[in-house]
C-alpha cells in the first residue's frame, strides 16, 4: 500500500489514467487530498501520483495493454479523497470509477469501465464508452454520452441530454427543461418530464414503439414562461417512452 498527501485548499482537477482496477473518489471537507493505492506491489509501485498546481495526476507508468494484463488476479484499488467541488477526468480500459460526494463535473473515457456516482454533479458529465454503464442520482449541468452497449440511468438532469448509442438503454427519471437528443439503433429510452414542464417532440423509428403518457397535442402550458423540454429522437428498432416524473 502507498499513501500520498497533498495540501489542496481549493478544489482540484483529478486526472486519472488507469487500465484496470477499482477506483473510489470521495469529496471531503478540509484542504487536503489523499491518494491511497492498494493491490499488487508492482502495480502500486508503477503508479505516478503528482500535484501540479490544482491538477492532481494519478496515472500508470505502463503504456498500452500491459496495465490490463497486470491487473489479472488481484485488482489495483485506488481511494482518492479530494475537496468538495473538484472535477474528475478519468481514462480507463476496464477500471470502474465510483464518485461519492459533490463534484463540479466529471468526464470518463473507457472500454468497459462503469461510472457510478452517489451524491451530486453540479456541472456537466461527459462519457465515451464501449460497454461501460453510467449511473448517478443527479446532474445539475448537461449530460453527454456516447456508447456502444452501455446503459445510462440518471435520476434527474437539470440541463440538456445528448445520448448516442448502438444498443445501450437510457433512463432519465426527470428532465425539467432543455433539449433531449437521442440517437440509437436498438437501445430503449425512458424519459420522465418534470411536473409543470411541457414537451416539444420530434421522434422517428423504423420499427421501434414510440409512446407517451403526456399529451403531445392540444395541450398548452398554463403560463407562457413554463419550461419546455425539446425532445429529438431517432432510432432503428429501439422503443421510446415519455412519462410524467414522479
Image: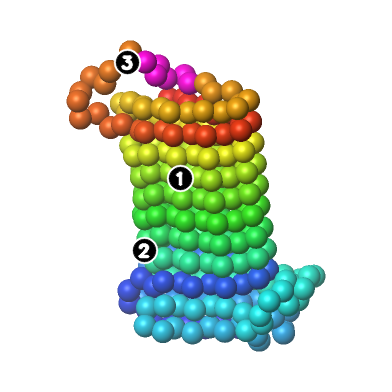
Quadrant of the frame with the C terminus: top left
Q: How many marks?
A: 3
Q: Judging from the image, what secondary structure is the residue with disc 2 in? A: loop
Q: Residues within 10 Å of mark 1 (few under 14, many from 20)?
A: some
User: What residue lies at 72% left-to-right and 74% top-to-bottom?
Assistant: 65
1 vs 2, front mark: 1
Residue that mark 3 sits on: 219
Residue 153, quarter of picture: top right
Q: Which mark is residue 85?
A: 2
Residue at 51% from the left image edge and 50% from the top image edge:
145
Residue 162 disc label: 1
Local crowd size for mark 2, using a 10 Å CA cut-off: few (<14), some (14–19), many (≥20): many
Q: Residue reaching furthest left? A: 224
Per the rendering, the mark at residue 41 is: none
Please tell me which residue is depicted at 41% across the width and 59% down the height of the picture: 105
Residue range in magenta is 212-217
Image coloring type: rainbow
Amino acid at each position: 500500500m502507498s499513501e500520498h498527501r497533498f495540501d489542496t485548499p481549493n478544489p482540484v482537477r483529478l486526472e486519472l489514467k488507469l487500465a484496470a482496477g477499482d477506483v473510489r473518489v470521495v469529496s471531503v471537507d478540509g484542504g487536503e487530498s489523499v491518494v491511497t493505492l492498494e493491490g499488487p506491489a508492482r502495480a502500486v509501485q508503477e503508479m505516478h501520483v503528482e500535484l501540479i498546481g490544482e491538477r492532481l495526476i494519478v496515472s500508470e507508468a505502463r503504456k498500452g495493454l500491459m496495465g490490463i494484463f497486470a491487473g489479472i488476479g488481484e485488482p489495483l484499488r485506488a481511494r482518492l479523497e479530494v475537496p468538495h467541488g473538484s472535477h474528475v477526468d478519468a481514462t480507463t480500459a476496464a477500471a470502474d470509477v465510483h464518485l461519492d460526494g459533490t463534484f463540479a463535473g466529471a468526464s470518463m473515457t473507457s472500454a468497459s469501465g462503469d461510472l457510478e456516482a452517489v451524491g451530486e454533479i453540479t456541472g456537466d458529465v461527459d462519457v465515451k464508452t464501449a460497454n461501460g454503464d453510467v449511473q448517478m442520482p443527479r446532474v445539475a449541468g448537461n449530460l453527454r454520452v456516447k456508447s456502444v452497449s452501455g446503459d445510462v440511468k440518471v435520476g434527474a438532469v437539470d440541463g440538456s441530454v445528448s445520448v448516442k448509442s448502438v444498443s445501450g438503454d437510457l433512463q432519465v427519471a426527470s428532465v425539467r427543461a432543455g433539449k433531449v437528443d437521442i440517437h440509437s439503433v436498438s437501445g430503449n429510452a425512458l424519459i420522465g418530464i418534470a411536473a409543470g414542464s411541457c414537451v416539444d417532440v420530434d421522434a422517428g423509428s423504423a420499427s421501434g414503439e414510440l409512446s407517451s403518457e403526456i399529451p403531445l397535442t392540444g395541450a398548452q402550458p398554463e403560463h407562457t414562461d413554463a419550461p419546455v423540454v425539446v425532445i429529438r429522437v431517432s432510432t432503428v428498432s429501439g422503443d421510446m417512452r415519455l412519462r410524467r416524473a414522479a
